[in-house]
Amino acid sequence: MHEFYLAGGHQMNAFTDFYVTIAQHPDLQHWLSHIPTKLDLWQTHKCHKFYSRWQKVLAKLSPITGAELQLDDGFYLQGDVPLIPQEQTKITNLLQTFKPWRKGPFYLHGIELETEWRSDWKWQRLIPHIQPLSGKTVLDVGCGNGYHMWRMLGAGATTVIGIDPSTLFLCQFRAIKALAQPNAPVFLLPLGIEDLPSHAAFDTVFSMGVLYHRCSPIDHILQLKAQLKVGGQLILETMVIEGDEQTVLTPIDRYGKMNNVWFLPSVKTLQVWLKKCGFTDIEVINVNTTSIEEQRRTDWMTSESLTDYLSSDQQLTVEGHPAPIRATITAIKG
């Protein structure tokens, strides 16, 4: 039945632990007839040209004996005995191969991997307001390098699957997992949500920072709904603008120097969209203006960041649109 992950192909070996896990998961077993083909196509046609080079770097990373991973207040990996400076430098240099690092931060054996985003701040804002993740099967759509997936695991989730088509993010995730917990039930697939079987398999689905990149936001919401079990919770975070139920900003050209921003709804419009898609118990749990302290340039992400996307008074984007506001909304699949 599962000969595909014993065939010895390079791509198959890379995802064998994932296949073994879902083969034993009653809600995900059906993925075995679909996902391996999608991952084959990804490796053949879509993975980054540096993938082979990055894999050689990943092979040099492994857990440190006696290290413990603490996920309650962030991502902290530390052993009983501090690493010698030479070993710290080696790990730092290997991890810097995968710059730029967007989501984090990660604290690894005394190494402060300060990412562009303080993703821990976002997690602190939402975790008190969502249904408990203990014992849950969770999907993180547009997961980036997987920072929030580790926090989901720390909150008690039993299986966490993230999807993001970026090869670099996949390698960043694998680098962290190789150092921390290679056998952890946390997996990143370099796929989009359109590549997943439309089958209700998850207790909780996260989509954070994705909706405004979709040319059809209603279709995206319906795709998220299709992955949820009845009674499951959606956590949706996206950029919004001020306005009523009919307010949507569609940038003609760019928004904050991004050319892939399609729709920024008001919070009230977003609630209408969710209701029309059949969600119930819709709650706005946070509305937050993105600050230059939360998204910034660091030694691990040295290219442009939020200050370069805003006007001098930080009230507008450089194109003249309202500065970024992010809303997080929860909803239940009825």
Image (spheres, helix red, strand yellow):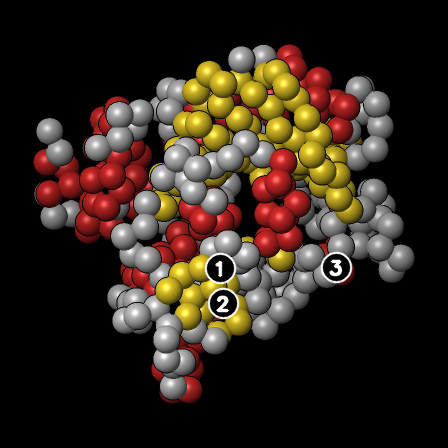
**In the drawing, does residue 26 fall left or right of residue 243?**
left
**Amino acid under disc 1:** Phe
Image quarter of residue 60:
bottom left
**In the drawing, does residue 185 fall left or right of residue 288?**
left
Q: Position of residue 323 (x, y in %)?
A: 80, 46
Q: Are marks 3 and 2 in contact (CB under 8 Å)?
A: no
> In front: 222, or 202?
202
Q: Which residue is found at the position 59% from the left and 47% from the top?
A: 123
Q: Position of residue 101 (x, y in %)?
A: 52, 61
Residue pointed to by mark 2: 107
Can residue 54 be seen from the camera position used here? no
Above/below status of 101 relative to 17: below
Q: Are marks 1 and 2 in contact (CB under 8 Å)?
A: yes
User: Crowdedness of circle 1 by 10 Å Cα count: few (<14), some, many (20+)?
Assistant: many
Residue pointed to by mark 1: 75
Q: CA distance from mark 1 to mark 2?
A: 6 Å
Q: Position of residue 8 (x, y in %)?
A: 11, 48
Badge 3 element:
loop
Q: Which residue is found at the position 80% from the left and 19% from the top?
A: 246
Callout in the foreground (3, 2): 2
Badge 2 element:
strand
Q: Position of residue 104 (x, y in %)?
A: 54, 58
Image quarter of residue 191:
top left
Residue pointed to by mark 3: 292
**Amino acid under disc 2:** Tyr
Above/below status of 174 relative to 320: below
